[in-house]
Image (cartoon, grey):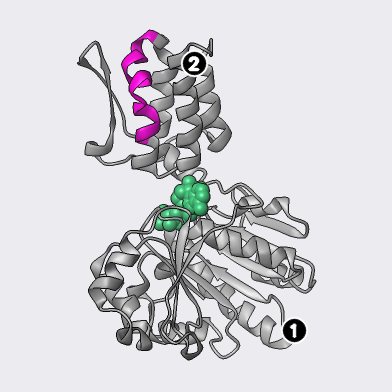
């Protein structure tokens, strides 16, 4: 299965939804999670998360844990430097393929941000395409190795607005040309909203019929890139610029940590205009794409307007801190 779509369009969310359902139905999964998007699955029975702030499990230990049919494993690589992530996946994927050939477990192997790992000609050495059972998630499907794309039996697309990617997906669906032009197809994929997806008709049985899907609620909360956006700055142009009484104050926030620091330092009166206009929730939705957090913050802004909350700063900070883990930056680290 391939899950494709624009950045921040909900790919990891929908993949997490699929994982939840598979786990609930008793399947055993191994999820290779480069950004720490799947750790909340630990709330489900039999799911163990490795990695994160701890060292990654050795391949040997991982295989031992996966011998049990009632265990699913998430490997959180979000704290691992990029090169080490590549190295780790290159050693773990063939080992998982061998284990599965021998034991049938894990039933599904999920690789998020798959374009980082699965574009080289040696992709057949990493994945066992005959047994399949992979779910690959990427915003750059066009970068995946051709053999992988050709092996896709199901393709789920959250919004896709990049014409190059739209073209690559269109090329996957041989029977689609009879039903829709590439342009119509592009419009359809580009207009999906959060909470919607499309199942592309890549197999013959689907007879070229595109299915638009409304996504069910998640069982476990999806926390996006828990650590990623705390310290990674958004572009200059996307920074939050704090204004007061119609003039910029000179304070800006390019990271969530900087945003929180300003909210902590200044009295609520300093944010009156922003709170009334709902600027904080808009920034969080538009720049970070974190709609659940934006909704909570919008609630705080509404309460401010109606005067029904006494401590706005605490409300805001609680909303952010309960969603993102504020790990202290390591001394000397470059963020
Ligand atoms: N169906 C949905 N209902 C509610 N919130 C959603 C839904 N889909 C996505 N979101 C929220 O939207 C944000 C972006 O989703 P997600 O992280 O899954 O996107 P992505 O496409 O995987 O992004 P990236 O390209 O950065 O990996 C997240 O905060 C997520 O919780
Ligand atoms: Mg993602």
Q: What residue is rendered at 36% in x and 34% in y?
A: 282
Q: Where is residue 273 in the image (x, y as percent from the top left)?
A: 31, 16
Q: In this view, does 28 lie above or below 238?
A: below
| Quadrant of the snapshot with the C terminus | top left
Could you tell me if residue 330 is visible in this image?
no
Query: Which image quadrant is residue 275 in?
Result: top left
Q: Quick one: label 1, few (<14), some, or many (20+) residues within 10 Å?
A: some
Q: Position of residue 238 (x, y in %)?
A: 27, 38
Q: How many marks?
A: 2
Q: Quick one: label 2, few (<14), some, or many (20+) residues within 10 Å?
A: many
Q: Is residue 106 above or below residue 265?
A: below
Q: Confirm whether the magenta stretch covers residue 158.
A: no
Q: Earlier in the sequence, mark 2 or mark 1?
A: 1
Foreground label between 2 and 1: 2
Q: Where is residue 84 in the image (x, y as percent from the top left)?
A: 48, 62
Question: Is residue 190 or residue 288 the one in the foreground?
Answer: 190
- Tell me the chief SS of the magenta region: helix
Pointers 2 and 1 in contact (C-beta within 8 Å): no
Q: What residue is rendered at 51% in x and 74% in y?
A: 90
Residue wearing tag 1:
103
Kind of element beneath mark 2: helix
Kind of element beneath mark 1: helix
Q: Confirm whether the magenta stretch covers residue 280.
A: yes
Could you tell me if residue 273 is visible in this image?
yes
The residue lying furthest to the left in this view is 247
Query: Which image quadrant is residue 198 in?
Result: bottom left
Task: Indicate left or right for 288 with 90 as reference.
Answer: left
The magenta segment = 269-283
* Label of residue 312 in the image: 2
């Amino acid at each position: 299965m391939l899950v494709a779509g624009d950045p921040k369009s909900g790919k990891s969310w929908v993949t997490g939804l699929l994982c939840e359902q598979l786990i609930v139905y008793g399947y055993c999964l191994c999820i290779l999670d480069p950004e720490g998007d799947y750790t909340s699955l630990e709330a489900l029975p039999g799911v163990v998360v490795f990695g994160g702030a701890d060292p990654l499990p050795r391949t040997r230990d991982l295989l031992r844990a996966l011998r049990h049919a009632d265990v699913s494993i998430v490997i959180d690589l979000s704290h691992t430097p990029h090169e080490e992530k590549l190295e780790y996946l290159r050693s773990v994927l063939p080992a998982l393929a061998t284990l599965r050939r021998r034991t049938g477990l894990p039933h599904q192997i999920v690789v998020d941000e798959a374009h980082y790992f699965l574009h080289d000609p040696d992709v057949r050495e990493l994945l066992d395409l005959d047994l399949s059972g992979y779910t690959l998630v990427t915003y750059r499907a066009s970068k995946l190795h051709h053999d992988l794309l050709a092996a896709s039996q199901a393709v789920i697309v959250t919004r896709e607005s990049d014409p190059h990617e739209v073209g690559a997906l269109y090329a996957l669906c041989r029977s689609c040309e009879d039903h829709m032009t590439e342009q119509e197809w592009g419009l359809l994929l580009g207009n999906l909203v959060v909470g919607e997806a499309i199942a592309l008709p890549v197999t013959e049985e689907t007879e070229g019929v595109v299915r638009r899907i409304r996504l069910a609620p998640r069982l476990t909360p999806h926390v996006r890139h828990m650590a990623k956006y705390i310290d990674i700055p958004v572009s200059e142009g996307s920074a939050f610029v704090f204004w007061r009484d119609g003039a910029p104050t000179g304070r800006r926030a390019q990271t969530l940590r900087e945003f929180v620091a300003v909210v902590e330092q200044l009295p609520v009166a300093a944010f009156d205009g922003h709170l009334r206009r709902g600027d904080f929730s808009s920034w969080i939705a538009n720049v970070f794409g974190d709609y659940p957090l934006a909704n909570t913050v919008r609630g705080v802004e509404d309460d401010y307007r109606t005067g029904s909350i006494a401590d706005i700063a605490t409300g805001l900070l609680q909303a952010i801190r309960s969603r993102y883990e504020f790990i202290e930056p390591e001394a000397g680290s470059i963020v």
